[in-house]
Image (spheres, helix red, strand yellow):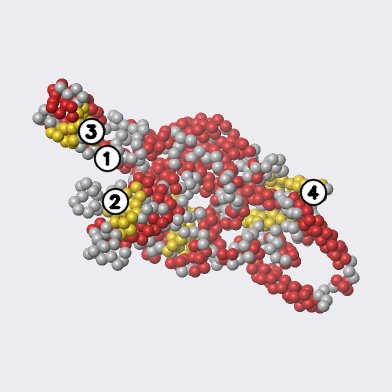
Amino acid sequence: MASLSANSITPMMRQYLELKEQHPDCLLFFRLGDFYELFFEDAVTASRELELVLTGRNCGREERAPMCGVPFHSVDSYIDRLIAKGYKVAICEQLTDPALSKGLVERGIVRIVTPGTVTDSSALDEKANNFVLALCKGASKIGFSAADVSTGAFSLGEIEDDAQNTRLFEELARIQPTEIIVSDAIFEDQGLIKKLKGAYYVYGYAKWAFDPETARKNVLSHFRLADLSGYGCEDMTEGVCAAGALLAYLNETQKNSLEHINAISVYRRSSFMVLDEATRRNLELTKPIREGRSARKATLLGLLDRTKTAMGGRMLRSWVNQPLTDRRAINARLDAVQAFAEDMILRAAVGDALEKVYDLERLCSRLSYGTLNARDALSLKNSLAVIPSIQNDIFASGHKALASFAEQLDPLTGLRDLLENAIAEDPPAVITEGGIIKAGYNPQIDELRQAATEGKDWLSRLEEEERSATGIKNLKIGFNRVFGYYIEVTKSNYSLVPLRYERRQTLANAERFVTPELKELEDKILGAQDRCVALEYEVFLEIRKILTEHIDRIKRNAALLAELDCYRSLASVAESYGYVRPKITDGDRLHILEGRHPVVERSVTGFVPNDTLLDRENRVMVITGPNMAGKSTYMRQVALITLMAHIGSFVPAKKAEIPLTDRIFTRVGASDDLSFGQSTFMVEMSETANILNNVTARSLVLLDEIGRGTSTYDGLSIAWAVVEYLCDVSKIGAKTLFATHFHELSELEGLLSGVVNYRITAREVGEDVVFLRKVVRGGTDKSFGIQVARLAGIPQAVIARAKEILRKLEAAEINRSVESPEESAPPRKYAAVLSELAAVKPDELTPFEALGLLYELSEKARDALSAAKPE
């Protein structure tokens, strides 16, 4: 395109190229009449990605410009497909009426659509936010700001910058953005930007937008503030930089006032339980590990979500993603859930009312974008209409925990009455076709409609008069879009046509005529219809403007209704499945009686409940038992019960006492991360290191088979050291569930204060093993590995050979145990390793240093063992 001379192309194509030059990274959808057209390279790309026919158009040069297009009425579906493939789309509209324009129609880019700024409901999950995120890196902190333009949600926050970017990716896992814009400092960090681009849609944005002073002014201007102290973010420099840059980006791409983004939610990490990506994945909070037809139901969110509204579904998702850590706030939620749980009548009444509520947040977005149509206006009216009944039901119930919701809800009676009086009961989807304003609302519209209606009677009377005057019995008056109204006479009656008839059209068997009287009627009828449609459009725009002025009140209602929906949903699940209200404490005692895994128990029959006790005297549970016995399920249920309590949900147990927990860590399973050159064992150690570097005494830790990714002795040594570190109250003292196949770790009970042994019971029945799924005190020294292999379908020949090898190994172990002290004493070659180990001061080592030393000593020990073997 750069080679095209401005003098050699047509004016329209020059207009296209000038607009394209403004946004070279976008596919430009150029409005031409009833189509959006793409040209040159954009056309080639779009035709390939959308499977469109590639044609050409004269552009003023010998070679025609490549061209493809899509109808304007179905453009959203095509744009959605391109966005899903990672493209950005610039939408160019006709800004003047072609019929009234003198010369070239004025055109301009009215919006840029990117993955994080999609607003088309058909392309979005109604119960999930679609966030675009801005990141700004300062000297010691990373600021972030997230916005969902489809709902108006807007937040900012800050995190401490750390070498491994652990905290950043924890927040990204919580927010789950579909698009990220970043400052230069982040884009220039090659390691970080590579990791970001490996998981997200990321690109750098204008440096000026992240300037602290510019960004701050942008935030103050948009939210009409004198300062930021009211939101408590005055001192959050990096967070405000990210927020200002994000607003600049949204103003550039959305090109509207963004009235629906009217409040800031300030995120403070200390207010919420921190969950890293591994924990979210392992606990299957919102996404299942295994995809499938009913995948969503296999998640905690899928189980808890019985919300009736899209707003409630999005809010409940955010609760699951960021559990609270404030005891008062948690108990306030539990009080509300309890009110609904104890009152079936109220729960049903509010549920029935909420089913009639549309997505008010996304309706506000359409108001802000100027795309709200008459059907949307009816949806708003019907949503507001249920508020009085919800208020009355809550007041009548007498539940104090819910009274504030009834008091704060705003029926917006004036708006509801306006929409009731103004909008037709069954309006068309397009607001430029008429039929959207109810009769009786606007006298002028009523008069024009009457004129259009009476016109039919006028035409009928004229038709009868002409038949009588001419004697042509089959004379009729008709209409088409090309010639307007006409009098049609068949050929057999040509001789009866009077001279005052003016011929309009000749057909095979008839002639069409007009008369001065018919032309006058045509002007009255068609003029009335056109004026009526135009006036209805103007009146609707006035109504939409009034609605836009009340976006903040509508959004407050949306938030209140969504919160009620969440409480009602959690109460419904609690009543259905026999959950109990947990007791939230400031202590360190975690006590669960007959706890159950909330998701697994719904998919199996006869789920076996189990107790859990973790406190200062019982800090670490070492859990042994065979594979498939239920160790992982048991550990996950403890974590999920703890998390559910922190979101304000009742829990699957007979009784539960849950201490405030700052983090839940899980190290369950591992897989190679070849894209970053990490082996299974390296992934396992990296995740373990993350835990050891960030765990506190208020954390809950789940560790499953630590050390199995390397040799037996290495793995056992690492697992042993990790248990010691977590259990030591002078270092951590965290509540830990540690599942292992290293039966030697059972020896830690009695050696380390706070370590207690538990096992998952199983019973041998002949050559089979029956899993009893019960967690009991004590360790086990039998793994039932061969029996489990047989249950899994390993061929019988392999099973038989495994038993033979096992007998030989057990015999060899017994022989080694009865060797003489001289034979079993460490050879001199071990002395260097032992000497070095004796000099270690564990209390002075960081977890990373400890792991590094362990690798080094284990390597030396292997060399010593190899050297000690007889030739």
**Mark 2 near mark 4, Cβ–Cβ under 8 Å?**
no
Q: In whole angstroms, how far apart are the C-alphas of marks 4 and 1?
A: 79 Å
Could you tell me which residue is drawn at 82 percent across and 47 percent down? 765
Kindly identify the amino acid type of the residue bearing the numbered disc 1: Glu
Residue with the mark numbered 1: 538
Question: Could one spot residue 713 in this view of the protein?
Answer: yes
Residue with the mark numbered 3: 479
Query: Badge 2 local density, few (<14 within 10 Å), some, or many (20+)?
Result: some
Q: In whole angstroms, how far apart are the C-alphas of marks 3 and 2?
A: 29 Å
Give the SS element for disc 3: strand
**Mark 4 near mark 1, Cβ–Cβ under 8 Å?**
no
Side of 195 where 184 appears, left or right: left
Residue with the mark numbered 4: 768
Q: Earlier in the sequence, mark 1 or mark 3?
A: 3
Kindly identify the amino acid type of the residue bearing the numbered disc 3: Phe
Q: In whole angstroms, how far apart are the C-alphas of marks 1 and 3?
A: 28 Å
**Mark 3 near mark 2, Cβ–Cβ under 8 Å?**
no
